[in-house]
Amino acid sequence: MSAPKIEAYSFGMIRIDGSTYARDVMILPEGVISNWRRREGHLLIPEDIVPVFEAAPEILVVGTGSVDRMKISEAIKQETHKRGIQLICMPSGKAWQVYNAKANEKRVAGAFHLTC
């Protein structure tokens, strides 16, 4: 089975493998977790992405929102480093393209904030 592919992103919307989502998503090598919520809204902490850690990707691409509003905690940086996961963070408008490019070559997961 190939990794899910992102077909389009715009503010508040992402289309993955023909399905459109209007809430934040996590993308695992095996599929999509829709309506993804974080404990602290615009701060990403390890507890928010437990399914990603369980999936053991080589790379995690985080889309931080259209204007880069979601921040990445130091704990996320430490935990991904400890697990040998390359962490790539950037605004969602660019992150979805990076996710697709990396998914062609590695085991990749994604976490996408769709709005601000």
Image (spheres, helix red, strand yellow):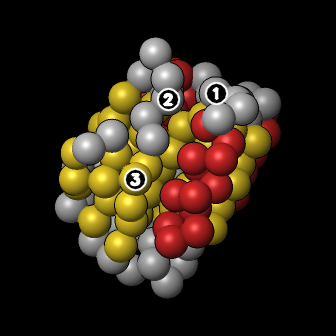
- Left or right for 1, reference 101: left
Secondary structure under the numbered disc 2 in the rendered image: loop
- Left or right for 70, reference 38: right
Viewer-proximal residue among 2 and 68: 2
**Amino acid type, callout 2:** Ala
Residue 84 picture quarter: top right
Q: Quadrant of the C terminus?
A: bottom left
- Marks 2, 3: nearer the viewer: 3
- Disc assigned to residue 36: none
Q: Earlier in the sequence, mark 2 or mark 1?
A: 2
Q: Position of residue 93 (x, y in %)?
A: 51, 71
Q: Label 2 vs label 1: CA separation? A: 8 Å
Label pair 2/1, CB-CB below 8 angstroms: yes
Residue of label 1 = 107
Residue 47 visible to the viewer: no
Q: Position of residue 99 (x, y in %)?
A: 59, 49
Secondary structure under the numbered disc 1 in the rendered image: loop
Q: Position of residue 35 (x, y in %)?
A: 23, 49
Viewer-proximal residue among 49 and 32: 32
Q: Residue at x 70, y 30 (%)?
A: 106
Residue of label 3 = 7
**Amino acid type, callout 3:** Glu
Label pair 2/3, CB-CB below 8 angstroms: no
Q: How many marks?
A: 3
